[in-house]
Structures are given as structure tokens and as C-alpha cells.
Amino acid sequence: MQSPQRYIAHFDLDSFFVSVEVLKEPSLKGKAVLVGGHSERGVVAACSYEARKFGVHSAMPTKKAIKLCPHAIVLKGSHSDYSKYSRMVTEIIAARAPLFEKASIDEFYLDLTGMDKYFDPYKWTIDLRQEITDKTGLPISFALATNKMVAKIATDEAKPNGYIQIAPGFEKEFLAPLQVNKIPGVGEQTYHTLLSMGIKTIKDVSEYDIKKLESKLGKYGIELWNKSQGIHTGEVTSYHEAKSISTENTFEENKSDMEFLLAELVRMTEKVAYELRQDEKLAGCVAVKIRYGDFNTYNKQVAIDYTFRDDELIVIAKDLFKKLYKPGTPVRLLGVRLSELTNNPVQGSLFDDGLKKNELYKAIDDVKNKFGKYALKKARTV
């Protein structure tokens, strides 16, 4: 039996952080705007297309960006607003799409395979894009293709604020003229290696001897050749599957000492936050679970601004615990869960006031990775 034709859409919220700032302050529209690089030592998290014309790009030091574009408006950014708009888009897509993956705070994949029996998938996707724009005011680009890789590459070609379909069977033809570093995974080093081999375009890769590619690049050479043919088998992973990190502890004896319970809560939150960072994720929801000595179990959760930082998550977990706990009642089990996980955009360095904190967490995690996850602990948990 022949497999159904695959239809994969890739949605990208154009210059998401900048677009949110423009919604808040319309006078910024059409101007060179940098978000996230507010201090002298800052790093640009996002920039408008007007700033990109001067060579500015994300992850660039603010100092360099301002030299390239002296008239740029530099904004600190609002993590809370970005979380709010990301959730709005997620809710719209979740209500319409049969299967979707939230790849990051501003990027989504939709699997529309099988819908062609009832609708035109391309028109359906155009209508969904329009609904998102109408309800949020955000510009959005998308591409519809037969696999995730081609859809992602095509979305970049559709920007800004445009859309495109790569019809089945035309994947290789579409990819052929594009620069080889348009293929996801081709970094700076690989790109220069390919250039030294005389490979500039994706067509060059597709026509290159696969054995020579393998001898030069190892197994990645074979993978790269397959991608140049428009072949990619990555699946859209349901947003609702395996999207939480949790831990819980059942005590040998029921506990009612507040100091002990809070110390345990801090220890567990620190543990799941570390796992979150190792997975390069951000969490958008925190939940606390309490089971009393009579086995009655209670949960309380709250949506939060996306984060991976212990200090922010611990404050929220403690607040949930205090709202949930019946003082003096013996506790049998305590648990913490982080959910609504999404990929960590630009390593979470969205704001300058968090850069030093992020560097601190990286140093802490480096120690834990070397000497074990319990090598460093919060003083309260010792």
C-alpha cells in the first residue's frame, strides 16, 4: 500500500522579539531596532530587517552592531510579553492543527498529512497564517513542503512575512541554486570545508561523488548528500508528548517540618532546572505535588514566563507550595514538575541583566557535569 503524500508546514514568527516591541510601540515600525543588547557588553537577541541591511545579526555583540548601524534603537526587551504572544500563537495552532511541534518560542512545524482528502493543505495553511496575524498582529512566514528540512529552508526564502509551497517532486529543483550553508547543520567550519572542495551550492553537493563526500566528512557527508536530494525523514513530534521534566520524593517517615519541606522543595527544583538546561529547554509552567499521610494528593500549577533559571523557578515553586500546603499536616510525598517546554532561543540570553546570571549557571553546570549533579547545592538544602 502506497504511503500518503506528506504535507509539512513550517511557521516562523518573523523577527519575533522585534515584532512584539513594534506592536507595543507602533512608531518603531520601519526603523532599525535591536532587542536584547541593552548594555555595552550585551548581545543582540534579535534585530529588525532594517538593521540587518547594515550587516547586523542576532548573537552579535551590541558594541559591534551599533558601529555597523549607529542610528539603531536598542531595546532591553520584555520576557513576559514574548511568553504571552508565544502562548497566543500556540493556542491558535493547537485549536486547528491535527499535529504540531513547537520547535521554539517562535517556530512551529505542522503535519497536515491526510488533510488533502478534505482540504487543499496550502489554502488551509494560508488561512491559518491569516488567523494568527488577525488575532495577534504578528507577521508570520511559512512554507509547505513534503518534509521538515525543505519546509524550514523554504520559509527562510519566503521571508519577510511571506509564504511558499514546494510542490511534491520539486524539492531538489528548489534547493539546487541555494548556497550550501542554507542546509540546517552546515556550520561555519563545514561551510569553509565545502568551499575548499569547490562546493558552493546545494546542486554542487547533489552532483558530488558520495564516496568522496564520506571520505572527507565521514557519515555527515552521506547525510549532507541525502539532504541535497531533498530527502529528510525527521518526524513532527507532538507538542503534547514528553514535554515535562519532573521529580518527586516519597519520605520514609511523614514530614511536617516546614523548614525541611522547603529545603527539599528547593533541592528538587534545582535538580529539574539543571536537567532542563542540559536538554537546552525553557519551561513555561511549574507544578508542585503534595501527598499527605492519608494518601490524599493535591497539585497546583501556574504558567510562567519561559525560563531555565533556578532562582526564578524556586521562588515560584515555594509560592505554589505555600498556597497548597496545610500547615502542620504530615507529608508523605513531595514533587516538582516543569512543563510546557520549548527550545532555548539564543541560549536564553534575551536580556543584559540576565547575561551574568546565565554565565553563572553555565559555570555551575560545568562543575556538576564534571563532578556530579550534586557537587553544588543551594545552602538551604545542605
Image: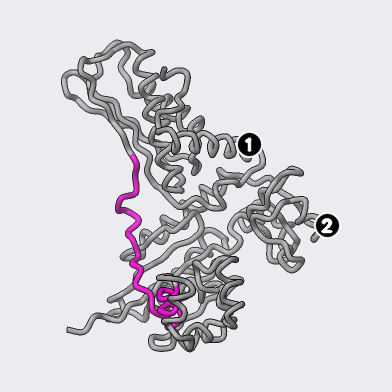
Residue type at numbered disc 2:
Pro
Q: Quadrant of residue 121?
A: bottom left
Residue type at numbered disc 1:
Lys
- Mark found first going from the N terminus, 1 or 2: 2
User: In the image, 347: left or right of 110?
Assistant: right
The spot of residue 143 in percent (x, y) is: 48, 75
The image shows residue 163, relative to residue 354, as above or below, that is below
User: In the image, 189: left or right of 108?
Assistant: right
Q: Which residues are magenta?
A: 221-245
Q: CA distance from mark 1 to mark 2?
A: 26 Å
Quadrant containing the C terminus in the rendered view = top left
Residue, x 43% and y 71% (percent of image)?
218
- Could you say which disc has been placed on residue 229 in the image? none
Q: Which residue is mark 1?
A: 356
Q: Is residue 240 magenta?
A: yes
Residue, x 48% and y 37% (percent of image)?
365
Q: Residue furthest front?
A: 215
Quadrant containing the N terminus in the rendered view = bottom left
Between residues 91 and 373, which one lies in front from this camera angle? 373
Between residues 187 and 157, which one lies in front from this camera angle? 187
Q: Which residue is mark 2?
A: 70
The image shows residue 381, relative to residue 92, as above or below, that is above
Q: Is residue 207 magenta?
A: no
